[in-house]
């Protein structure tokens, strides 16, 4: 029911993005910049050779119920991530190279921080196999709006290591 209630919210795309690092993968023009993760083009992506953090800003404070992360897997097959709203941890776990909606307790805020932790393994397949990576990546990030099929609260394999944050 919570996932269905998201259909009644507006999908919000952050207006600005800044990151701790921006590394183009193999010299490609479609990887690197943090702004690629909120430009509406899923073929461009923020990439970082190592752990990284991206701060996304909305135009104003909003009640955020979900964070949608589009991930196409150009540089890695996933990351272990922590997601914050105005510096408060709201979600933590595996983001594979697939789209995922992170359902959170409704939280008012303006800044969404997406942090990758390469020292933590992420789940890479339905058998629970884990792996550590060397790159960080996001294809597109938005908040609220319709949910992707996989969330951190349903039976998708990529939520085996997700933590419940209240």
Image (cartoon, rainbow, N blue to C red):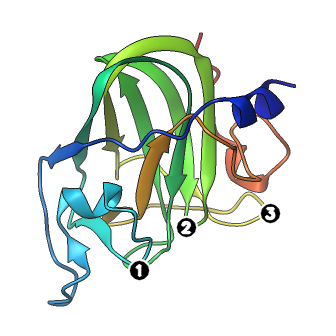
Using the image as rendered, state which of residue 98 and residue 3 is in the foreground. 3
Q: Is residue 122 visible?
A: no
Q: Position of residue 106 (x, y in %)?
A: 58, 13
Q: Secondary structure at mark 1?
A: loop
Disc 2 element: loop
Q: Residues within 10 Å of mark 1 (few under 14, many from 20)?
A: some
Residue 148, numbered circle: none
- Report the residue at 71% width, 30% height from top: 8
Asked if labels 1 and 3 touch by Cβ distance under 8 angstroms, the answer is no
The residue at 20%/67% (across/down) is: 49
Alpha-carbon span between mark 3 and mark 2: 16 Å
Q: Residue at the location (15% across, 48% down)? A: 19
> Nearer the N terminus, badge 3 or badge 1?
1
Residue 35 in the image: x percent, y percent? 21, 58
Of circles 3 and 1, the one toward us is: 1
Instruction: Say which of marks 3 and 2 sits in front.
Output: 2
The residue under the point 63% across, 65% down is 124
Tell me the element at label 3: loop
Q: CA distance from mark 1 to mark 2?
A: 8 Å
Using the numbered discs, state the Cα–Cα distance from disc 3 to disc 1 in whole angstroms: 22 Å
Return the x and y of residue 116 as percentages of the image width and height.
34, 47
Image location (x, y in percent) of residue 122: 54, 54
Residue tagged 3: 127
User: On the rendered image, what quadrant is the C terminus found in?
Assistant: top right
Q: Considering only order in the chain, which callout, 2 or 1, is on the residue closer to the N terminus?
A: 1
Horizontal side, residue 30 vs residue 72: left or right: left
Determine which residue is flagged by label 2.
97
**Crowd class of label 3 (few under 14; some 14 to 19; many from 20; radius 10 Å):** few
Q: Which residue is mark 1?
A: 74
Question: Mark 2 and mark 3 in contact (Cβ < 8 Å)?
Answer: no
């Amino acid at each position: 029911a919570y996932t269905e209630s998201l259909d009644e919210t507006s999908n919000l795309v952050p207006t600005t993005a800044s990151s701790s690092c921006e590394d183009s993968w193999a010299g490609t023009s479609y990887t690197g910049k943090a702004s690629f993760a909120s430009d509406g083009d899923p073929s461009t992506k923020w990439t970082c050779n190592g752990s990284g953090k991206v701060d996304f800003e909305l135009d104003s404070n909003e009640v955020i119920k979900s964070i949608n992360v589009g991930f196409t897997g150009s540089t890695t097959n996933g990351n272990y991530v922590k997601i914050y709203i105005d510096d408060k941890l709201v979600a933590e776990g595996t983001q594979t190279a697939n789209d995922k909606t992170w359902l959170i307790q409704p939280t008012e805020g303006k800044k969404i921080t997406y942090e990758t932790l390469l020292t933590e393994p992420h789940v890479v397949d339905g058998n629970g196999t884990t792996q550590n990576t060397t790159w960080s990546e996001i294809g597109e990030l938005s908040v609220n709006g319709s949910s992707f099929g996989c969330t951190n609260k349903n039976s998708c394999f990529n939520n085996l290591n997700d933590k419940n944050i209240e």
